[in-house]
Image: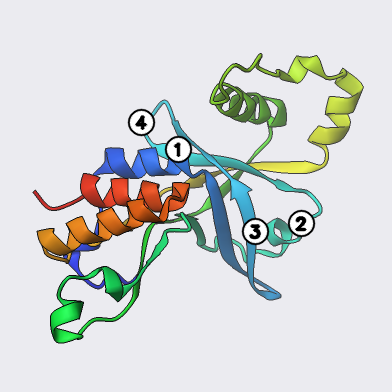
Amino acid sequence: MFISTSAFEQTQWQEIQQFIVDYPLATLITQTIDGIQAAHIPMILQQKENSETVLIGHIAHANPIWQSNFNDSEWLAIFNTNGHYITPNWYPEKHITHRAVPTWNFQAVHVRGKLNFLDDTAAVLAMQTDVWEHQLPNNSAWKLNDAPEDYLQSMYGAIVCFEMSMDSVQAQFKLSQNKSAETRSSIAHNLRQTGTHEATHMADLIEKYSPK
């Protein structure tokens, strides 16, 4: 991943982990015999007994991406947000010099690694379900045994579970850190003035990750 300035690079492992937890839907990309293929897969982090952290997910059995992948090929998982457009009209200096252009603020994490396919489908689904069911407020958590066993068995056969090693991790939190304190304050203020949830969240992020 190209990172234009070190100000945008996020190296704190705790921050990267939390981002993956908060935005678990990854774009999973690999080279196959049919060319580059991608799938959109929600994944969770798991720390194994040897302290290695991996990503856990599952792919539809009918999806050819897992079958046509070259043996031992590398996979790329991209976790990201929509981010937000930043207009130069929010830059105080624009009104003086007019030397300003638009940009887009965003957060993204790239993970490269190898896939290891898992046999215990029920255990993987139980783990994933437990994580996401308990993230829902005021929810009586659904469990696998809430469904009939014969139905579950038919569902197990329709998916392929995997763990993905995290051999390389890059993170970019591009949140106006390369701007002056005055400009960052102006951007955050104007974002809040738009009144949308996305804009308010971006304003919060700009303030949270402003250089100290």
Question: Nearer the N terminus, badge 3 or badge 2?
Answer: 3
Q: How far apart are marks 2 and 4 (CA)?
A: 31 Å
Question: Nearer the N terminus, badge 1 or badge 3?
Answer: 1
Q: What element carries label 3?
A: strand
Residue annotated with mark 2: 63
Q: Where is residue 97 in the image (x, y as percent from the top left)?
A: 14, 85
Question: Nearer the N terminus, badge 2 or badge 4?
Answer: 4
Q: Distance between the residues labelled 1 and 4?
A: 18 Å
Say whether marks 2 and 4 touch (CB < 8 Å).
no
Residue at image coords 76%, 42%:
159
Say whether marks 3 and 2 touch (CB < 8 Å).
yes
Left or right, residue 15 beside residue 138 = left
Residue annotated with mark 1: 21
- Compared with 122, 107 (above or below) is below
Q: Position of residue 95 (x, y in %)?
A: 19, 79
Q: How far apart are marks 3 and 2 (CA)?
A: 9 Å
Any mark on residue 51, and which?
A: 4
Any mark on residue 39, and which?
A: 3
- Compared with 48, 64 (above or below) is below
